Image (cartoon, helix red, strand yellow):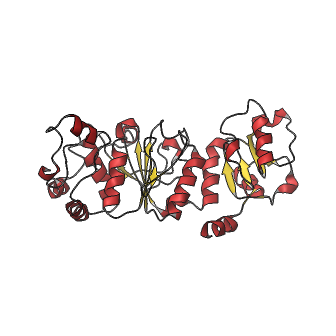
Amino acid sequence: MNRLADISYLRLTIGYIVRTFGAVCDKPFASCVTFTSIATKAEEVTQGSLFVPSCPLSAPAPLFEAEEAGAYGIGLEKGEEKAGLDLDIPIIYMDNWRENLGLIASFLMGDPSLKMAVFACFGMDAKPVAPILSQLLHILGNPVCLLDFENSFIQERPLDLSYPLDAVDVQKAEAEAVEEGCSAMVISANPSTLSRLALTGTHVDVCTGSRVLNLVSKPGSPRALQPQEEPLYGSVFDTSTRVVAYAKDPFDVLDKDAFNQLIDVVPMGRASVRTAISMALSAGITTASIRKAISISGSFPQEPGDREKEQDRPGEGHDKDES
């Protein structure tokens, strides 16, 4: 019921989209029409949806399918006005629909990324960090959502998603995570998981990966990312966003004191582990909390495939008791 109350309060209307994004509606009298959801695929349309096709139309059939399924409006690029479509429901024409769709979805969902700590691991090189970080946050007592094409979940409940995710998919997952009490979301931000602008409308608190390291003058220690710097996948950065170094040789990721406090309880030789810990520290978690949680749990998160490697090579796996 809280979700319904939020939607009713926010009131995503055609008038709001027209005023805020400079759009044009073919039925000006319909400015008060209110949407209760957004869909980018015709099969996802429900009663009250705004349907915005995920790519330029090659045929009008999906629009008629959406109208039949109960859509209250259609969103198309201004260049598609020439098609002369005649639908009973309003058509909203806008430049750069795909660039703005995440912002509109975020508004409708109540800015869910502002209600969690959001960690983003950019690029395939940083992909191993995401599952380790999600497990570490879980061990520390945080309800976590992970978005990763190999294993997306909310508090250990698997998510059935179609990859790569678009901005609406991500905003829906964020809203669902907030509803289920998650305090953190970890996103594996790579082409296999996300489409080009999938993080539009998502506020990132801590990030890592070689792509973001290009924005850092001196890799090695977290620093604030300025708003004017490159928005990866359309994500929202502000002066509080922290960038954490990730490299194959990660010995500058953690300062000496943090390293010495953790080295006897975690496998610090792995770049992904050290980066995950550094991201947690950047979010305000203390080394004492990490040390205590790992000591109590008796184990540290493994990279995907570690368990199989240990089974394939008996005696060569990492001995947790010796870490």
Asked if residue 60 lies left or right of residue 181, the reply is right
Q: Position of residue 130 (x, y in %)?
A: 37, 47
Q: Position of residue 90 (x, y in %)?
A: 82, 49
Residue 294 appears in view: yes
Q: Position of residue 283 (x, y in %)?
A: 35, 59
In this rendering, the count of numbered labels is: 0
Q: Residue at x 69, y 40 (%)?
A: 53
Above or below 304: residue 241: below
Nearest the camera: 171 or 284? 171
Q: Position of residue 141 (x, y in %)?
A: 34, 64
Nearest the camera: 70 or 108? 70
Q: Quadrant of the N terminus?
A: bottom right
Q: Residue at x 47, y 65 (%)?
A: 181
Asked if residue 24 lies left or right of residue 175, the reply is right
Q: Residue at x 54, y 42 (%)?
A: 165
Above or below 307: residue 156: below
Residue 282 appears in view: no
Q: Quadrant of residue 215?
A: top left
Above or below 316: residue 202: below
Residue farthest toward the left in the current orientation of the protein? 322
Q: Residue at x 64, y 47 (%)?
A: 100
